Amino acid sequence: MTQATAPTRATGVEMTHRQILEALSGLLLGMFVAILSSTVVSNALPRIITELKGGQSAYTWVVTSTLLATTATTPIWGKLADLTSKKLLVQLSLAIFVLGSVLAGLSQSTEQLIACRVLQGVGAGGLTALAQVIMATMIAPRERGRYSGYLGAVLAVGTIGGPLIGGVIVDTSWLGWRWCFYVGVPFAIAALVVLQKTLHLPVVKRQVKIDWWGATLITAAVSLLLIWVTLAGDKYDWISGQSAAMVIGAIALGVLAVRVENRASEPMIPPRLFRNRTITLAVVASIAVGVGMFGASVFLGQYFQISRGESPTMSGLMTMPMILGLLISSVVVGRIITRTGRWKRYLVTGSALLTAGFALMGTIRYDTPYWHLSIYMALIGLGLGMTMQNLVLAVQNTVDTHELGAASSVVAFFRSLGGAVGVSVLGAVLSHRVKDYIADGLTALGIPATGSGSGGVLPNVHTLPGPIRTVVESAYGHGAGDIFLVAAPFGLISLIAVIFIKEIPLRQHTGDARTDTVAQESTVAAAAGAAVVRTGTDR
């Protein structure tokens, strides 16, 4: 039987390679819309925040708000996927995402933009969780690496195309930055149509029980923590009464959330999952990867535009080494994993590359040669391509079918949480380091440093006098290096975590883990029996 016609068991449904690709087409198109709508803004953000007269804090929260909403809603979408129609859910999440995008394009202030980005995050949470769940429903773990490569390719194309499209839109006077939010709408409509025609999955019919208390407490704890990290050191001191109240409050809400989750019949994040060593270590690694994927890389556009004075279009082009590294590693490694069934070595290698890339990026300044930057970014891209999808694959390979949604969403949840915390922490670090570097630079020029605080409007370096422009470019360049140095230990944490993950052979079908174990034992026994028969015959 050829590869194109070999059936794959998907919860009782026989699907050929072609049928799986048809079913995934709409899903991948939906993921492309989500990725495009996120990355198309990355290089436009400095221009957007400047035109809306926002500061570094607003820049950070435009990104953090989406990640926070994604983080908070991912477990809800994942739990719903275990209880009701996955097709309906992915269409609903796509519609919510498009609505948020359109409203974001109409924003008149940074506050309105942040609110609309929250709505985008709700939809993105659904697309993030459901893409992994649907793939796990249709495709056996052993074959999933191959299809995860397609998902990685879509991720790379969306990430490559987004900044370039966004840069062109911002640099085109008759379009403007608002079209960065509108450009994905036609793709979204196409995705809805394709999903309706091609995605046909069995619907689990049982009473839906959503742990709203757990979801609320988890969201409140994470939100309070992020608000504290973002505002501390600017609105109030790190060591102050406000800081103490917010930290204690976040811890109390977290403890209460754990208590509620332990007692809930359908918890958002089932505590029993963490008894599984693979899931626990994958979650730790996912947090670290999230910090790198969202936290550090989100400031690259700002670095190229402010520190190096590049246009949004050139800023997108200059990130190509990282994106190409991600594209190559995700596709190639996905196929190798499908062929060999071995995955741990790539997690270890990817985490090592990620750590090295962050550490090297910690040395950058505003005048660092671009070919140095290219090597450093390529290492980060290769590391992300080897770790992101494969951490989810490792977890899905250890749980039963009825827990795929919860387990997949747990990894996505903590990856988004790491990203949200990373953006807040690194944004705060950048803000304060830039403030100090600008003050030092201005003092060296004999200019009073008052008014150089981090809460000011992001500068347009092209309008600044020569000496002051150099001070600002140097400050933002040095600050960018500092935040990558802060991110490097998180890459090391990811490396340590994946080293201790036990490699379990990838299952050949989408059934329960226990069923697969019995099947493997039966196969071994049958093979042994056949060997005995052959031996007796030979004699």
Image (cartoon, helix red, strand yellow):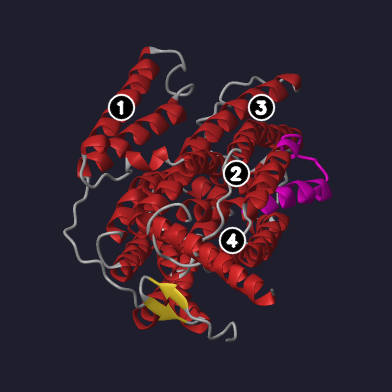
Q: Residue at x 71, y 37 (%)?
A: 473
Q: Which residues are magenta?
A: 359-384
Is label 3 in a helix, a strand or a loop? helix
Instruction: Decide: few, some or many residues near mark 2? Use Cα within 10 Å; few <14, some 14-19, many ≥20.
Output: many
Instruction: Decide: few, some or many residues near mark 1? Use Cα within 10 Å; few <14, some 14-19, many ≥20.
Output: some
Q: What's under tag 1, amino acid-wise?
A: Val
Q: What's under tag 4, amino acid-wise?
A: Thr
Which residue is the site of mark 4?
159
Give whichever of discs 2 and 4 has the lower sequence position: 4
x and y percentages locating residue 124 in the rendered image: 40, 57
Q: What's under tag 3, amino acid-wise?
A: Ile
Instruction: Decide: few, some or many residues near mark 3? Use Cα within 10 Å; few <14, some 14-19, many ≥20.
Output: many
Give whichever of discs 2 and 1 has the lower sequence position: 1
Residue 255's disc number: 1
Residue 299's disc number: 2
- Asked whether the beta carbons under mark 3 and mark 4 sit within 8 Å of each other, the answer is no
x and y percentages locating residue 195 in the rendered image: 38, 77
Q: What's under tag 2, amino acid-wise?
A: Phe
The mark closer to the camera, 4 or 1, is 1
